Amino acid sequence: MPETKTDTVQIALVTGASRGIGKAIAKALARSGRFVYLNFNSNQKKAAAVLEDIISNGGDGALLQFDVRSQEASEKAIEKIIKEKGKIDILVNNAGIRDDMLMVWMKKGNWQNVLDTNLTGFFNVTRLIVKNMLPKRFGRIINISSTSGQIGQAGQVNYSASKAGLIGATKALAREIAKRNITVNAVAPGFIETEMVDGLPLEELAKTIPAGRLGKPEEVAATVLFLCSKDAGYITGQVIGINGGIL
Ligand code: NAP
């Protein structure tokens, strides 16, 4: 891409963009003209299919494999983006996992892996990007939390803790960098139709949701897209629920 175009085109990084919500966010950002780096951990085939779809619809982007649990791998990947494009305007911390069980049965590994991915992953990816955004005096950071982090969910002590931690981190970081025109917000989806809810009793769940149905990844992506816009520049440190009314 010519240098002049790179200067004007916004550069976005979406972690966990191979499937589900991250895929929908990456596609929405690309449709709106951003160059999107699609991060994934192991699912290269699915990530490549997302990129192919983006390119065939006139968008642009690149694949970027790294494990958000590793600070070294995350920072190496971010340095690569900065070397290639000189900046990152938009960061969507979306990569996440769940490993549900009652706390009495939970092993340290079940706790640690979820916290390492969902919360420490935020730190590993965000620190260096913020450092790059500060002198540019622009940035949009969106963290994908969860209703579980707002209300707590039985069977998800590890996941709820990670997602509540992400809300605290969002609010604190927002205060640190608001003056530099960098916004930091969280969205908190309820039950969204992705592979993450595979195996859950979906029909029963739908009955507990005021909207009477699960949400779609595109419905999360639409809010993220708005938070990335110029118009959303005065929204920071907020948590926006996308949950069909369950909270
Ligand atoms: P999903 O379909 O299971 O996709 C998870 C994504 O995260 C995949 O792209 C996966 O990459 C990536 N990922 C997992 N571990 C990673 C790691 N260590 N490093 C880099 N990438 C990693 O999940 P989803 O439902 O779209 O969820 C996306 C986010 O929304 C998560 O943070 C989740 O907690 C949150 N959320 C989901 C729901 C829901 O109902 N679905 C509700 C609230 C919040 P690979 O394909 O390479 O494995």
Image: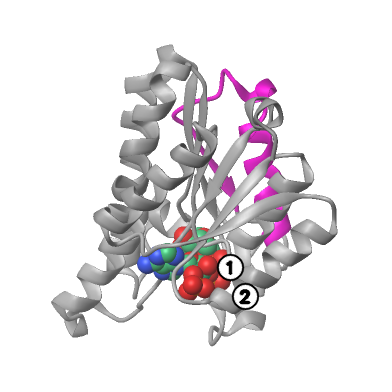
Task: Identify the element where label 1 is drawn.
Answer: loop
What separation in Å lies between label 2 and label 1 (alpha carbons)?
Answer: 5 Å
Q: Earlier in the sequence, mark 2 or mark 1?
A: 1
Report the coloring of the rendering. Answer: one colour
What segment carries the magenta color? 216-242
Q: Do the residues under discs 2 and 1 have CB atoms within 8 angstroms?
A: yes
Mark 2 sits on what residue? 46
Task: Work out whether residue 6 or residue 68 is closer to the camera in this orientation and state it.
Answer: 6
Q: Is residue 62 magenta?
A: no
* Mark number, residue 148: none
Mark 1 sits on what residue? 18
For residue 180, what is the image quadrant? top left
Q: Position of residue 205 (x, y in %)?
A: 60, 75
Q: Position of residue 187 (x, y in %)?
A: 53, 45
Task: Work out whether residue 162 or residue 29 is closer to the camera in this orientation and state it.
Answer: 29
**Residue type marked 1:** Ser
Answer whether residue 208 is visible to the viewer in this image: no
Q: Where is residue 176 in the image (x, y as percent from the top left)?
A: 32, 21
**Residue type marked 2:** Lys
Tell me: residue 150, above or below residue 199. above
Tell me: residue 101, above or below residue 148. below
Quadrant in the picture for the N terminus: top right
